[in-house]
């Protein structure tokens, strides 16, 4: 068995995850991840749907594997015939862990995250919005990497939002990895659709859970000027809900009482700024300036 630290949790698993930080401490694990049998009643449900969320049991099935998540402390997986074991690991760390922490009352936010001595900055946005460029700019200005794709945020009513780190790796597409001189055979292949690899981050990594200073949401807009605006009111709630890692699977369920309340708690505790860059214009420098100016106010 292997033990790791991930998102502030101690994991014990029968799978080796090369990208995770090994935990050599003592004590019982917060989460166990093991191979096992998936109940037949769940398998029967696959004819109608491929996933389901519950406070006690959640599950997911795809062409690679089946995952069952129980009570916020256990993931049972079953690799399907012909399934890729590396893809299995990716699904466990992504979908599986997101479902698990939701049962624990914690939100998995789809974002890059960086931190300094004042706390964490979450950098959100859909593919092509500029998250990687923005993250690189912060790292080049003395920030530490916390997460490249997903951070866990816990907010208790009336308290600060706390972000927990992922692991010291970044995603790069094939061309970017080759340009940086990596041997692709030595990297972890993670994304068949977008042809991406996990590469080790050589800079300083934020190991501890820290308060969230704020959330930057990047987007592409019509027009010819960079747009910045503070997200306020009910829009803050929607901005959090629409940047959940599980947003596409949850659909309208993200607005149901339990998950919706978690989003409301985060929206009340975290300042949010939207930065829109005009399509077809080179505004990278201006976007960065506005981002750093915003962050300095938090």
Image (spheres, helix red, strand yellow):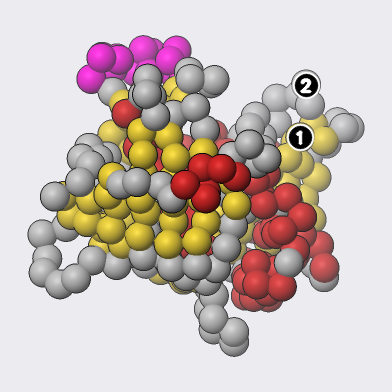
Vertical placement of residue 29 versus 291, above or below: below
* Contact, mark 1 vs mark 2 (Cβ under 8 Å): no
Instruction: Give percent across and percent down for residue 220.
Output: 76, 35
Residue nearer the viewer, 96 or 145: 96
182 part of magenta stretch: yes
Instruction: Give percent across and percent down for residue 49.
Output: 65, 41
Residue positioned 54% across, 20% down in the render: 193
Q: Quadrant of the C terminus?
A: bottom right
Residue positioned 87% across, 32% down in the render: 222
Residue positioned 70% across, 31% down in the render: 283
Vertical placement of residue 292 versus 230, above or below: above
- Circle 2 packing at 10 Å, graded few (<14), some (14-19), many (20+), is few
Q: Kindly report the distance in space between the C-alpha atoms of the residues bearing marks 1 and 2.
A: 10 Å
Vertical placement of residue 195 versus 122, above or below: above
Residue nearer the viewer, 153 or 118: 153
Residue nearer the viewer, 156 or 285: 156
Q: Secondary structure at mark 2?
A: loop
Q: Secondary structure at mark 1?
A: strand
Residue 22 seen in this snapshot: no
Among numbered discs 1 and 2, the one appearing first in the sequence: 1
- Kindly give the residue lying farthest to the right in the view shown: 223
Q: Quadrant of residue 289?
A: top right
Indicate left or right for 144 with 148 as reference.
left
Indicate left or right for 46 with 26 as reference.
right
Q: Which residues are magenta?
A: 173-186
Q: Quadrant of residue 185?
A: top left
Q: Which mark is residue 280?
A: 2
95 part of magenta stretch: no
Residue positioned 65% across, 72% down in the render: 258
Q: Which mark is residue 220?
A: 1
Camera-near label (1 vs 2) is 1
Q: Main secondary structure of the magenta part?
A: helix
């Amino acid at each position: 068995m292997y033990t790791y630290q991930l998102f502030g949790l101690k994991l014990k698993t029968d799978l080796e995850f090369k990208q995770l930080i090994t935990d050599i401490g003592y004590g019982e694990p917060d989460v166990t991840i093991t191979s096992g049998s998936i109940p037949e009643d769940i398998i029967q449900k696959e004819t109608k749907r491929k996933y389901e969320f519950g406070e006690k049991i959640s599950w997911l099935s795809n062409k690679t594997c089946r995952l069952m998540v129980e009570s916020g402390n256990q993931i049972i997986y079953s690799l399907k015939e012909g399934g890729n074991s590396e893809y299995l690991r990716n699904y466990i760390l992504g979908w599986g862990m997101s479902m698990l922490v939701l049962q624990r009352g914690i939100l998995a936010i789809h974002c890059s995250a960086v931190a300094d001595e004042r706390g964490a900055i979450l950098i959100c946005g859909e593919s092509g919005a500029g998250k990687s460029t923005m993250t690189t700019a912060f790292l080049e200005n003395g920030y530490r990497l916390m997460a490249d794709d997903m951070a866990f945020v816990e907010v208790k009513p009336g308290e600060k939002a706390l972000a927990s780190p992922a692991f010291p790796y970044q995603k790069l597409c094939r061309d970017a990895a080759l340009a940086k001189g990596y041997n692709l055979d030595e990297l972890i292949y993670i994304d068949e659709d977008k042809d991406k690899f996990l590469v080790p981050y050589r800079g300083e990594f934020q190991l501890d859970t820290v308060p969230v200073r704020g959330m930057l949401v990047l987007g592409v807009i019509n027009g010819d000027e960079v747009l910045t605006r503070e997200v306020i009111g009910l829009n803050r709630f929607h901005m959090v809900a629409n940047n959940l890692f599980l947003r596409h699977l949850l659909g309208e369920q993200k607005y149901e009482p339990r998950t919706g309340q978690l989003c409301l708690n985060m929206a009340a505790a975290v300042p949010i700024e939207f930065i829109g860059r005009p399509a077809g214009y080179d505004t990278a420098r201006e976007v960065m300036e506005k981002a750093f100016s915003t962050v300095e106010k938090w």
